[in-house]
Amino acid sequence: MTDRDRAILLRYHEVALKGDNRKWFEDRLAMNSKKALKAALGSTSPIQVTRPYGRILLETEWNPASQDALKRVFGISSFSPMRKVPTRLDLLTAAALEEFAKLAQVGLPKTFRVKTRRSDKVLPETSVEIDRIVGSAIKDTYPQLVVDLKNADFTLELEVRLNESFISSEKISGEGGLPVGSNGRLLTLISGGLDSPVAALSVLKRGSPTSFVHFYGAPFVGEEVLEKIEDLVKLVNRYQPENEPLYVVPFGKIQERIALATAPKMRTILYRRMMIRIASKLAQRAKALALVTGESLGQVASQTLENMSSINEVASIPILRPLITFNKDEIIAQAKRWGTYETSIRPSIDCCTLFADRHPTLRANAASIQEQEARLNIAEWVEEAASTTYVL
Ligand code: ATP
Ligand code: MG
């Protein structure tokens, strides 16, 4: 069998997809999948898309690269390579037996079912009749197998069409979620640790594309910090249809000025409020409706509700914190699953620790923040930061 005899069937969860929503969701998913496949295969050949009800069929190559690419398309619940077989019941049955012969080499399932769908009613038999005919041929060859229509270990799918039909073999789990582009645009504050890349991927999984902003501590941190951030952005961008930009805010000098004027214990929260003011402004440029951070409740001493409230006060748009209830081990597991772990653990300096106390304020109170911020030229520095921001 050659690659050209292959197609890939995409499945998605249909819950919550009603009326017009469905077509829109399918359009997005098909478009994102096509883009991901084209990027992965480097191919210019057109990928044909058809939509048998409730699923998407892409006529394209099947290889490790295409498999890998589809695992990064949010919205796909599972997918299967399909082989083309001329639409004749005897040939479909023979192909089904071949699939089982292949399975027998690695280990047969205990229970199975055949599930036929007809896009074209070219064969005289109904779908259920085809299920029975193909199913009993399999059962005759492998009498130990049990047919189970509800909870089969293995489902062989047949897609009957006019001249050529499709038959599935393996089924691979997708990432689920919603296709990127089906929800509003966001701007993620990315800092080079484990958390913020996972936060960005979590919102992508809910369908929101995101661009990135990094507050760069140069000249007090080295270039390796920015290289790491760029690498992380590339990894996250593999999960969205477009390569979204990274906004780099030169922040070291501003931090130095804050540090010269304020109490060491307060600096972390003052930096953070400064970042949020600047990010809120950049969000307009990035057309983002909300900001995203990797904060999680109580993960580090500074991530208290009091401090988060104080941070929220200076934001002009909502701040999403998708990891708010995650434990560190859950974040690490996601980072490994999504492929950002190895890059995140590369050593680098976090600019929030620059000139800051090792034991920052746990519960910033409004009065002391106000007192400290009165010493700063906030509006001017926000303006300066926004105008010196560059895009990578
Ligand atoms: P991470 O693992 O994402 O680095 P963290 O556990 O180190 O997070 P903090 O340093 O308290 O936690 O930062 C909390 C969040 O604030 C980060 O997840 C990120 O969204 C944002 N943030 C912190 N520093 C920066 C920075 N220099 N540039 C952009 N965002 C930042
Ligand atoms: Mg950090």
Image: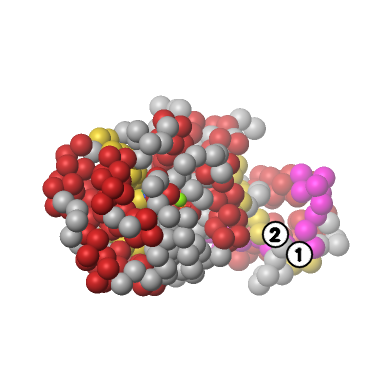
Q: Quadrant of residue 371?
A: bottom left
Q: Which residue reaches farthest right?
A: 144
Q: Position of residue 323 (x, y in %)?
A: 46, 63
Q: Quadrant of residue 240?
A: top left
- In what quadrant of the picture does the N terminus appear? top right
Residue type at the position of mark 2: Phe
Residues at badges 1 and 2 in contact (C-beta under 8 Å)?
yes
In the image: residue 269, left or right of residue 166: left
Q: Position of residue 96 (x, y in %)?
A: 70, 49
Q: Position of residue 244 (x, y in %)?
A: 33, 41
Mark 2 falls on what kind of element? strand
Disc number placed over residue 351 in the picture, else none: none
Check disc 2: other Cα within 10 Å, few if <14, some if 14-19, many if 20+.
some
Residue drawn at 52 percent across, 44 percent down = 344
Residue span colored magenta: 102-126
To which residue does mark 1 refer?
111
